[in-house]
Amino acid sequence: MSFVARRGNTLVLAICVLIALPVVTRNAVWTDSAALLGIYALLALSVGLSYGQAGILTLSQAAFASLGAYAAAICTVRWGWPPLADLPVALLLPALIAFPVARLVARLSPLATALSTLAIGSIIAIAIRSADDFTGGYMGIAGVPSIGFVKAPASYAWLIWAMVVIVVFLYENLCHSAYGRALNVLRFDQARAAADGVNPPMLVSAAFAISSSIAGVSGWLYAHYISFVSPESLDAHLSISALLMAVVGGAEFILGPILGTLLLDGLTRLLPAAELQGVYYGIALIVILLVARRGIFGLIEGGLAQVRQLRRSRSGEVTALEIEASRP
Amino acid sequence: MSGGLVAKGMEVSFGGVRALRGVDIVVSPGAVMGLIGRNGSGKSTLFNCITGFVRPSGGRVSVDGKDITGMRPHQVVAKGVGRTFQTPRLEARTSVLTAVTCGLYASVRSSLVGALFGSPWAMREERLLRERAEAEMERLGLANLRHVEVGKLSLGLLRLVEVARCLVSGARFVMLDEPAAGLTSVEKDKLAAEVRAVAARGLGVLLVEHNIDMVRQLCRSVAVLETGNVLCQGTPDEVLRNDDVIRSYLGALGDIEDAAGGWQ
Amino acid sequence: MNLRMLRALAICVGAVAMIAGSARAQDAPVKIGAVLSLSGPAAVFGIPERDAIQAIVAKMSSTTKGGRKFEISFYDDKSNPTEATRAVNQAINDKVVAIVGPSTGSGILAAGPIAQRLSTPLIGPAGTLAITDPKNEFYPWIFRAAPSDASDVRAILQDMAKGNAKKVGIFYQEDAYGKTGVDLAREVGPSLGLNVVETASAPYTATDLTAQATKLRNAGAQAVFLQISIAALGSSFVKAARQVGLSVPIYANAGLAQRSFAENVGNEVEGLRIVSIGNLPYDPTPGEAELAKMLEAAGKQPQGWGELTGSNALMAALGAIDRQKGKDITGASMRETLESLCDFDKFARGRVCYSAKDHDGWHEDALVITEVRNKQFRSVP
Ligand SMILES: Nc1ncnc2c1ncn2[C@@H]1O[C@H](COP(=O)(O)OP(=O)(O)OP(=O)(O)O)[C@@H](O)[C@H]1O
Ligand SMILES: [Mg+2]
């Protein structure tokens, strides 16, 4: 019972996916959008873990995703590995880079750390472009095979969203563990966390590494779904988009980044397509962030908390203030 | 002599200010050591340099004979030394239960990967952590505040939450920085009872407190700090009769708390 | 008796329905999608492509020469391969039978598998070699609407070989376009007696290129080849070259054949030779002049070859439609027709024939060597 209650986000997401995907996959364009949005949602989730939990404002997630994507492309196209054999590489490679980098920079100020992630993102992008023989340089790699049994776009949409649900499940496990609580403390007060016995740079780096692995998976899915990767596929713009998606939805809430992904993508599609779209988009973003500082989920949570308090005071349940007042 | 938490010749300076000038203190297992002194005398600084938050410029700290000087805070915790902060450091939106459970971090055995995958072993440990936290809250009279957000508590109760968070950690030595300030007398009694119980279990307690009654009730031995030096040390009654102490500390105490009248 | 009458009636009704149906199919406009880079870095070419297509459609009143109604809808690939796949998906969902675009090579490579899966050919106005690589699984579904980068490089190096230069220095921009140019020049050069002795590169945003120019000068380059599509990079390099005393003839690939380059540079680029796909703005052939007139009628000024490649792709699609007079047109039938399409109506120069073996169609005869004179590209006879 408490297990289910503490996996509320996973449950809600799984139900939403089970209801929405059968409808969505009836239309080819929606199916394609669902698949891509799932990939972006994973990227945004990786930002949620990194920024919302570990407090690292990351601008390198698309670079980690491209590591995952290139790992898939190189393993299958260049080396002829069967798809799926490349998944561990796509998971581990980003983490192996993210962890030591975070160990180095986690002690810096938040701004310096953010800039370091930006730098590591561009270093990865440059490395990919320069390693011609390996990565196809600027041209990229075409013809990445499908993942075995998964061929049709609808199957990809299912696979990708199943992956999103799995990641949310793991993420929720983490949040309800001692490590998740420690991250929460650490984000507000490193000294307090240290007094609990937390090694702040270590835990932050581990979380960042996990987040980069999530990004790696999203890249892995991208490569197999689109079948083509180039330096432009998962570029720095996408890192920024992913950050915006997470922040708009509510980076510290588990499902916030997913909501943000759907919202921002919807926004670009609803706004009149034109040279001015960027301007509208920017204005909409500013408005959202002004109204909801902690993202849409923050807004919802604030509302719920008010309702709950109202109900409590009506039902005569003791409130904190009453407890204080009745202290012996 | 090597048993217990031993700090010898601790020296700390902040720029020009010499906050500690060679302080010796020993906390023995099963005993409550009091630490008193006027504001700014260096009590919190002593806490900070023992627990690795401030790097001492001189002196050595050891736990049961093992040197822990210069270790980082989490390493000190791993050696079994816990502490509270004088100003509670808590994130307003966490619940009391969660805040106390955070104190158990050092005793967690399941790995990050185990936690991530929700392994049965990690889940069982998680349940155990919660039970331990609840038990500690029960003892300190915090049980009915379980789901209250810490941001809604008064400073006094916040300090009590801090104490619970420290005591629950399983540390063998706990250092409490003014835990009783702002508590009602019933709450103080509960706290005192818990501190005594903790010491009876064999933990060493270092207690900074302005409440003389409480110090007298709990402490077998008391040290008085004065501008970074140990002014004197002894049983509470000895110390509180010392002229220097009366002049330097208890004279100033009237401003801090009206407890001064209670001791003579 | 009754049965026979019923059957006759059924046949009559069926026949009428079929005629009506096919008549309706004939009446309904054939849908073509245009997936172009309307925003992002490739919009420099995507916008002229769109302008040309719009001007032609307006002029033809949405009816092919053969009298078939058609309808064209535009989609933005945002110069990004992922967006290109989304746009192609959307277009095919909107029931187009062929797609003009995507504008960029990477967009075409990303969208290729979708074109194959949903049986809708892409007619891509891009020079990127890889898009018509027979090794691609989706090869049957991609047709090129412009000479490939290989043709461009061969054409300009042939012109260079006519001079006395033996040692060539290359300056290129740091992207796929730049990199391919270098590789091709190294490959083609030796057969023309040209040796690449040094290369230098810069990112899009570089402004001071003296270091690069010096590098090429020190290597003793007797001619310089520019593989650039960013006009500002081109003018910066030429200025830097004159400053450091690198006074050798400079040749540029088609990327620089843009009005904005010719008009915004000073005297130092006089004599610079650039290969171009046609010469729409300055020395048009009669066909090109016709397109230029349409553009002007639509209120647009011809910019370079973007309009021509855009028109190439559209005209190939319209040509394929007209070859299927009276038939139902599908993506598959379009592909099949395109694969044998030869000598269709178009505005650009050169003879174009697609075949199962040649999805490039366009070759060196679509190109022209121009020289910058008086802030204009003048065709070299
Ligand atoms: N981080 C710091 N930087 C500079 N000076 C400091 C710092 N921390 C403490 N001090 C100084 O060191 C001296 C000792 O301070 P400390 O906080 O240890 O006193 P305290 O005995 O805990 O006082 P209180 O009873 O008010 O808590 C004071 O003079 C204080 O101003
Ligand atoms: Mg203090």
Image (tube, coloured by chain):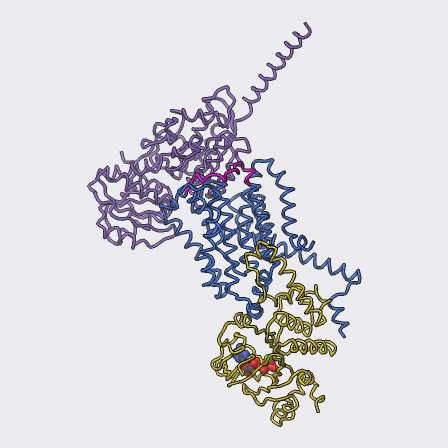
Residue at point 65% right, 56% down? A299
Residue at point 63% right, 81% down? B32
- In the image, residue B38 sits, relative to residue B141, either above or below, namely below
Give the colour chain A carries in the figure.
blue
Relative horizontal placement of residue B222, taking residue A145 as reference (left or right) = right
- Residue range of the region highlighted in magenta in the rendering: A141-156
Give the colour chain C carries in the figure.
purple
Q: Is A145 within the magenta?
A: yes
Q: Nearer the viewer, residue C32 or A55?
A: A55
Kindly report the secondary structure that dominates the magenta region of the rendered protein: loop
Q: Nearer the viewer, residue A111 or A133?
A: A133
Residue at point 66% right, 52% down? A8
> Is residue B45 at all visible to an observer of this figure?
no
Q: Which quadrant holds the N terminus of chain B?
A: bottom right
* Residue A216 x %, y %: 49, 50
Give the colour chain B carries in the figure.
yellow
Q: Nearer the viewer, residue B75 or A15?
A: B75
